[in-house]
Image (spheres, rainbow, N blue to C red):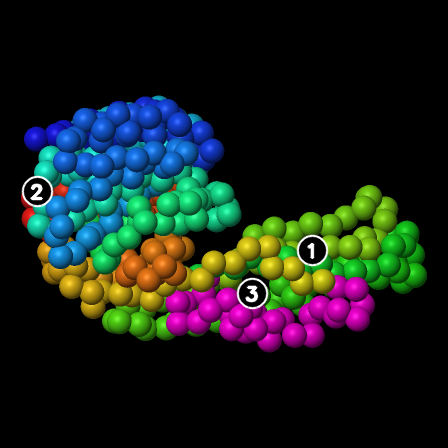
C-alpha cells in the first residue's frame, strides 16, 4: 500500500506555484498514463483521467496542482507522522490520495473522473478548471463531484460567495498648515470604516450547516506628500456572503450598509473588482450523502470559496473533502498528518467501491 506521507512529501518537493505547474502536471500525467483502465488527457497544465465502464453514475474527484508562494517552507520536511511544506495541506495531501486511488482502482463501483487542474490560487479568470469548462466541458461531466480541499477528513458542504469592492473617495488638496482650505479624503474614510467595524455577521443555516458571513477591509490607499491634505483615498473591502444569495443581492446589502459614507455626486466611485457566487450544500445527492455517512461525522459549512461553486454553476452537486487542517492552508506551518491522509483514503476507497 502506498505510503501517503512519503507520496505527499514527494509532491511538495515539486514546486508548483500558480502559473508554474508544468513540472507537476508532467509528473501526474506520467503516473496516470501508465494505467490502462484510464483515458488520460492533457489540456494545458490540466490533467484529466477517466474510467469508461458504463456505470450508472459518474463521480468527479478534483484537486488543484498549484500552491501559493512559499513562506520559508518551500522544501518538504517529514518528522514522525507529519509532513510540512507549502501546499502540504492545500492540497498536495489530497492529490497524493487521489493519485493513489486512481492508480489502484481499475474497477470502481461508479465511473470516475480524476481532475488535476492548474491556477486555483489566483484570480478566477485564470483558473485551469475554467479553461476546462470552456474548452473541454465533456471531460467534467458527472453526477456529483468531490473537491479535495483541506477539511481535516470531514465533509464541508457548499461554499460562500466572495466579492471585493474598491470604494474611492475624493477631497480637495491643501497645505497641512491650512487644512480648512481643503478636504481630507483619508479622513472621509473614517465613517465608512466605522460602519464596516460595527457590521454584525449574518448567519444562515442551510441543510443543517451554518454559514457566517464576513466583511473585512483588506487594503487602504491614499496620500500625496507629508505636507499635503490628500484629495483621494480608497479602501478595498472583501465580503464573504452566504450561498443563499447571489452577487446582486450581496452587493445591494453592502451598499445599504455604507449608505451615506460615499457620494457619487462628489466624484466618489464604487468598483466591484471581482465576485464569485457560492454554492449551497448538495448533500442530498446519493453519492454525497454516502460520503457524509462514511465520514462518520456531521458535515459543516465551507466558509471560504472553493470550486464546489464552479461545479454547482454547471449543474454538478459537489462537496469538499480532503486531508489537512483548513486553518493551516497558506500558513508558514502548513502540514498534513499520516492519520488524516489515511482516513481520507479509507473513506473515499469505500465510497468508490475499490
Q: Could you say which disc has been placed on residue 234 in the image?
A: 1
- On-image quarter of the C terminus: top left
Q: Earlier in the sequence, mark 3 or mark 1?
A: 3
Give residue 43's mark. none
User: Mark 2 highlights which residue?
Assistant: 107
Residue 292 appears in view? no
Q: Is residue 280 visible?
A: yes
Residue hosting label 3: 197
Estimate the spatial distance between the alpha carbons at disc 3 and disc 2, rounded to whole Å: 55 Å
Circle nearer the viewer, 3 or 1: 1
Percent x, y for residue 263?
Answer: 74, 70
Side of 353 where 122 appears, left or right: right
Q: Nearer the viewer, mark 1 or mark 2?
A: 2
Q: Position of residue 100 (x, y in %)?
A: 16, 34
Q: How busy is the neighbourhood of tag 2: few (under 14 within 10 Å), some, or many (20 plus)?
A: some
Quadrant of res 205: bottom left
Question: Is 91 drawn above or below residue 160 in the view shown?
Answer: above
Which residue is pictured at 87% across the width and 55% down the height? 173
Separation of disc 3 and disc 1 at Cα? Answer: 16 Å
Q: Which span of residues is magenta-colored?
A: 240-268
Secondary structure found at label 1: strand
Task: Residue 242: say if magenta.
Answer: yes
Q: Which of marks 2 and 3 precedes in the sequence?
A: 2
Residue for point 36% across, 49% down: 137
Amino acid at each position: 500500500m502506498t505510503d501517503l506521507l512519503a507520496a505527499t512529501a514527494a509532491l511538495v518537493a515539486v514546486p508548483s506555484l500558480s502559473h508554474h505547474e508544468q513540472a507537476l502536471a508532467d509528473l501526474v500525467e506520467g503516473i496516470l498514463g501508465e494505467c490502462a483502465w484510464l483515458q488520460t488527457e492533457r489540456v494545458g497544465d490540466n490533467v484529466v483521467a477517466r474510467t469508461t465502464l458504463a456505470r450508472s453514475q459518474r463521480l468527479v474527484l478534483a484537486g488543484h496542482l498549484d500552491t501559493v508562494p512559499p513562506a520559508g517552507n518551500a522544501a518538504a520536511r517529514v518528522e514522525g507522522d507529519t509532513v510540512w511544506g507549502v501546499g502540504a495541506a492545500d492540497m498536495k495531501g489530497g492529490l497524493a490520495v487521489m493519485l493513489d486511488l486512481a492508480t489502484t482502482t481499475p474497477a470502481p463501483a461508479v465511473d470516475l473522473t480524476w481532475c488535476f487542474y492548474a491556477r486555483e490560487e489566483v484570480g478566477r479568470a485564470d483558473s485551469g478548471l475554467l479553461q476546462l469548462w470552456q474548452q473541454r466541458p465533456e471531460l467534467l461531466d458527472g453526477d456529483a463531484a468531490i473537491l479535495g480541499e483541506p477539511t481535516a477528513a470531514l465533509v464541508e458542504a457548499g461554499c460562500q460567495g466572495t466579492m471585493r469592492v474598491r470604494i474611492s473617495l475624493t477631497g480637495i488638496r491643501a497645505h497641512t498648515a491650512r487644512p480648512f482650505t481643503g478636504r481630507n479624503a483619508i479622513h472621509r474614510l473614517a465613517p465608512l470604516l466605522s460602519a464596516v467595524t460595527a457590521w454584525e455577521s449574518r448567519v444562515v443555516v442551510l441543510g443543517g450547516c451554518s454559514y457566517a458571513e464576513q466583511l473585512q477591509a483588506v487594503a487602504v490607499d491614499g496620500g500625496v506628500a507629508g505636507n499635503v491634505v490628500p484629495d483621494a483615498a480608497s479602501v478595498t473591502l472583501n465580503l464573504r456572503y452566504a450561498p443563499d444569495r447571489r452577487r446582486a443581492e450581496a452587493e445591494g446589502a453592502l451598499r445599504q450598509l455604507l449608505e451615506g459614507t460615499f457620494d457619487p455626486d462628489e466624484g466618489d466611485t464604487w468598483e466591484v473588482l471581482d465576485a464569485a457566487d457560492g454554492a449551497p450544500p448538495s448533500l442530498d445527492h446519493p453519492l454525497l450523502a454516502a460520503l457524509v455517512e462514511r465520514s462518520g461525522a456531521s458535515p459543516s459549512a465551507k466558509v471560504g470559496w472553493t470550486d464546489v461553486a464552479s461545479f454547482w454553476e454547471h449543474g454538478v452537486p459537489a462537496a469538499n473533502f480532503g486531508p489537512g487542517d483548513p486553518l493551516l492552508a497558506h500558513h508558514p506551518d502548513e502540514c498534513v498528518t499520516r492519520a488524516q491522509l489515511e482516513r481520507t483514503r479509507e473513506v473515499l476507497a469505500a465510497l468508490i467501491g475499490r
